[in-house]
Image: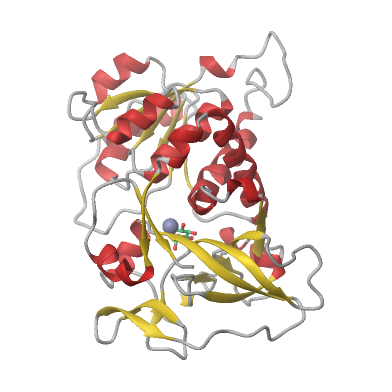
């Protein structure tokens, strides 16, 4: 079967012929891959700036934002059957006994760095017709979400971040709690969130914040007439083009910034905006910037604010199985509320044969998806 791969030795991105995998243990599932999303990480890997092939291979099969259909199950598979739609997890635990996160299946918090990731680090990815996978690394997706299931993996990043935000809010007893209508508590709509970057990660983050009830502002370079801005408005976000508004203007438009969800990967923008975070505010970093020369930041101001205003900034990567299950529920709610906007995050579906070009060049639009099946 055909697969899309990078060859770091010869610096090529190419199609490769690989044998169709067979179920080799009782708890394995054979999955027919349907769709795979392309993200910034894939483009970085295709520029040979990130990513590592498996130890015994000179190439790495690409793809980590997967959607597949169960083709066959081993005798010990309990909850999946042929025809079920599944989203595979990206990260595998490291082997070290001392890594507590990996030992409790929270490899997204791995402390040794020896985790492996499908299509990224030492494990082949999903850009091929079939994969085999243990049941524990597959999350079932309801069939009515077939159209948008490929967005699950990028949405898990937001889902994990917001699970952490709920824990952080426990320090503020007047903050809203899920499923509770307490008049003394602040209402979600009174909380202002700013999302930086209107790519797929930013749009999905903004949509997730809208589901939670935040008054949400999307701040990004695209002009007001762009599709990105239109989608933002469709999901009841305020769109603020960074072309027309600098940070002080943004602060005037938003008012008190309670939360920032950074999805642009720009350190200049992130540390620039950190200075404008409100009291008791939370700043979430999800973008991974390429390593460049150090930049000046207003460090005293930032540090003063962080201390005097009880601010908290954290970074987040990857996601656990529970975050995947929650992301799938959120995707269902997004489809009930804004089906068209949710679908339009996927700009175009391309055949596997066109993928090498897609990885190297960057067509305009939001999320490019490879149709494998
Ligand atoms: C993926 C994550 C992964 C991270 C770092 C991201 O693009 O969505 O699952 O952990 O890259 O490799
Ligand atoms: Zn990704």
Percent x, y for residue 54?
Answer: 46, 83
The residue at the point 23 percent across, 28 percent down is 225
- Left or right, 113 with respect to 10, comes to right
Using residue 27 as the reference point, say whether residue 275 is left or right of it: left
Tell me if residue 61 comes above or below residue 305 in the rendering. below
Residue at position x 49%, y 70% in the image: 126
* Whether residue 241 is visible: yes
Up-down relation of residue 55 to residue 132 (above or below): below
Residue closer to the observer: 324 or 361: 361
Which quadrant holds residue 45?
Answer: bottom left
Instruction: Tell me the quadrant of ligand 2.
Output: bottom left
Is 42 drawn above or below residue 172 in the view shown? below
Q: Is residue 217 visible?
A: no
Q: Residue furthest top?
A: 183
- Left/right of residue 124 with respect to residue 275 in the rendered view: right
Colour pattern: secondary structure
Q: Residue furthest bottom?
A: 56
Q: Position of residue 61 (x, y in %)?
A: 42, 77
Residue at position x 20%, y 43% from top? 296
Q: Position of residue 208 (x, y in %)?
A: 52, 34
Q: Who's the residue at 59% across and 47% down the image? A: 145
Q: What is the tally of numbered marks visible in this picture?
A: 0
Q: Position of residue 319 (x, y in %)?
A: 57, 54
Drawn side of residue 328 relative to residue 150, left or right: right
Above or below, 360 against 234 in this view is: below
Q: Quadrant of residue 41?
A: bottom left
- Closer-to-camera residue (298/346): 346
Residue placed most toward the observer, 74 or 105 = 74
């Amino acid at each position: 079967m055909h697969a899309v791969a990078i060859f770091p030795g010869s610096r090529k991105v190419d199609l490769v012929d690989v044998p169709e995998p067979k179920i080799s243990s009782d708890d394995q599932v054979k999955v027919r891959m349907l769709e795979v999303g392309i993200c910034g990480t894939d483009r970085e890997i295709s520029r040979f700036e990130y990513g590592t092939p498996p130890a015994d291979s000179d190439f790495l099969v690409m793809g980590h934002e997967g959607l597949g259909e169960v083709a066959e199950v081993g005798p010990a598979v309990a909850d999946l059957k042929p025809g079920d739609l599944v989203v595979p997890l990206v990260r595998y635990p490291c082997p070290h006994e001392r890594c507590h996160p990996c030992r409790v299946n929270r490899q997204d918090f791995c402390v040794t760095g020896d985790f492996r990731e499908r299509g990224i680090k030492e494990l082949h990815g999903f850009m091929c017709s079939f994969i085999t996978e243990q049941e524990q690394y597959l999350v079932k997706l309801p069939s009515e979400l077939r159209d948008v299931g490929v967005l699950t993996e990028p949405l898990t990043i937001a889902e994990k971040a917001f699970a952490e935000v709920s824990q952080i809010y426990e320090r503020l007893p007047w903050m809203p709690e899920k499923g509770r209508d307490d008049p003394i508590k602040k209402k979600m709509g009174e909380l202002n969130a700013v999302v930086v970057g209107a790519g797929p990660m930013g749009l999905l983050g903004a949509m997730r914040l809208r589901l939670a009830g935040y008054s949400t502002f999307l701040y990004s370079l695209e002009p007001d007439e762009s599709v990105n801005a239109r989608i933002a408005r469709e999901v009841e976000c305020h769109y603020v083009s960074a072309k027309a508004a600098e940070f002080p203007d943004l602060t005037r438009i938003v008012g008190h910034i309670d939360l920032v969800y950074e999805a642009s990967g720009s350190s200049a923008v992130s540390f620039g905006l950190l200075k404008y975070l409100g009291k008791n505010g939370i700043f979430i970093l999800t973008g991974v910037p390429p390593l460049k020369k150090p930049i000046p930041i207003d460090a005293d101001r930032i540090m003063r604010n962080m201390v005097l205003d009880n601010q908290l900034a954290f970074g987040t990567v990857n996601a656990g199985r529970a975050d995947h299950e929650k992301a799938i529920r959120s995707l269902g709610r997004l489809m009930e509320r804004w089906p068209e906007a949710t679908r339009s995050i996927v700009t175009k579906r391309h055949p596997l044969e066109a993928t090498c070009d897609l990885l190297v060049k960057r067509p305009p639009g939001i999320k490019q998806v490879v149709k494998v099946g």
